[in-house]
Amino acid sequence: MAHMLEERGLPTVVLALVLPQVEKTRPPRALMLPFMLGRPLGEPNDPPFQRRVLLQALRMLERTDGPVLLEHFPDDNPSWSDRPDWKPAVATSAPGLLDDAAAWQAAFRTELMTVLPIWERFKTRFGRTTVGLAGQPPEAWPAFATSYMQGALPTVAPHDTSALALRFLADDLKALYGEAVQADGGPPSARQIDWWFWRQTVAGQLLIALRDVALTSDNNALKTVGGRFFVPVPYLPT
Amino acid sequence: MARLDDIPEPTRTAVAGIPCPNFTTTPFRFGPRLSERRVAIVSSAALIRRGDKPFPFGSGEFRAVSGDWGHGDILMSHVSINFDRAGFQRDSNVVYPIDRLREMASEGVIGGVAETHYTIMGSTDPAAMVESADGIAAALLADRCNAVVLAPV
């Protein structure tokens, strides 16, 4: 995209996260960043750090010794490392595999009811939430999600298919729990949040179970979406 | 660089080995000092406004991100589940640094900030985005932008 915009008359600089891609595509100007995928400015709620990243990138626009300029940002973002003293804001325990849809629905609903008030604290503290893709409120999720275990293929606006409805419910579920667990204190690392969600919550276990349901479904869209877009590979059951 | 060793497989192999366009030209546009640059953001995070339909899988489209959207209205509809969302959950500036640009503009570090920014689905084949590049470039030039920060996720 940088190459195409530059061809069309616009000076560009890329905040780059993957060196092999930069080496292959050779964008006109790129600042290589040592941050994890998903956070090109590095550190949330740290304006001075974000400013350093952005300013180094913007200063590259003033260099005249291109084409093809590559600089490296020198520092990790502060919350890169795990915080050994971090305690999740929500006490949960994963149940392992449950017998049927009714048991999953009950366990998930119970857990969700304990998580929701803590999620409210996150929203108050940070003034925002990224939950909002599912097309329905959290209270509707337990019945909707577990209905797939009984063979149902429900839909809900704005999604056109039951595969997408479940996919974006999964996104919202991960977002709500991810936010709730950050409601208090300093930021844990992203790895700590992921491990907690996939190993310590009913919700994480439910998504793993729903992946199995999707993979054995006759609905090809659900099979594809469930197989690829519910559970990250590192957290698949071994 | 992002430590490839720290990206879990199979994402590590996928991002390192992803097919990339092989450009035969090296375009390079010059411009005025930073204090005279009007800056826009192009995000690959498939950002949407709360209530809008998510980007479809594999979409090559581009969409506008109006500068007047509140942080609580900005959602991410990118297809991949293999990158961090926790940073974005706390602060959308970690993906879409509009507040940082505005601060720099108010201090005179940059000349100004675009009225409207743009977003695409970064996992889509760039070959499917030629029309989007046309559309984004035309819109940004019409808005008198002379600097673009591309912020992939």
Image (cartoon, rainbow, N blue to C red):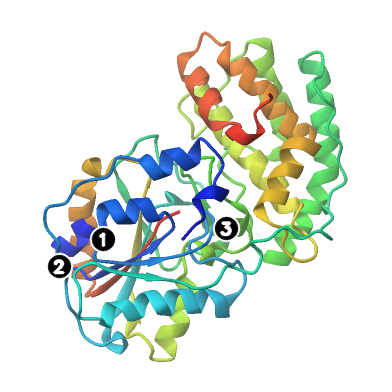
Callout 1 secondary element = loop
Q: CA distance from mark 3 to mark 2?
A: 31 Å
Label 2 sits on residue:
A9
Callout 2 amino acid: Gly
The front one of A96 and B38 is A96
Judge from the rendering whether residue B124 lies leftward or rightward of residue A161; answer left or right.
left
Q: Which mark is residue A27?
A: 1
Residue A33 lies left or right of residue A191; in this view the side is left
Please name the amino acid that badge 1 sits on.
Answer: Pro
Residue at image x 66%, y 33%? A235
SS label for mark 2? loop
Marks 2/1: CA–CA distance:
14 Å
Residue B29 in sight: yes
Identify the residue shown where x is 18% and y is 61%.
B138
How far across and how far down the image is residue A59, in percent? 34, 81
Select label 2 or label 1 by which is in front.
Answer: 1
Q: Residue furthest top?
A: A218
Q: Which residue is mark 3?
A: B88
- Front: mark 3 or 1: 1
Q: Secondary structure at mark 3?
A: helix
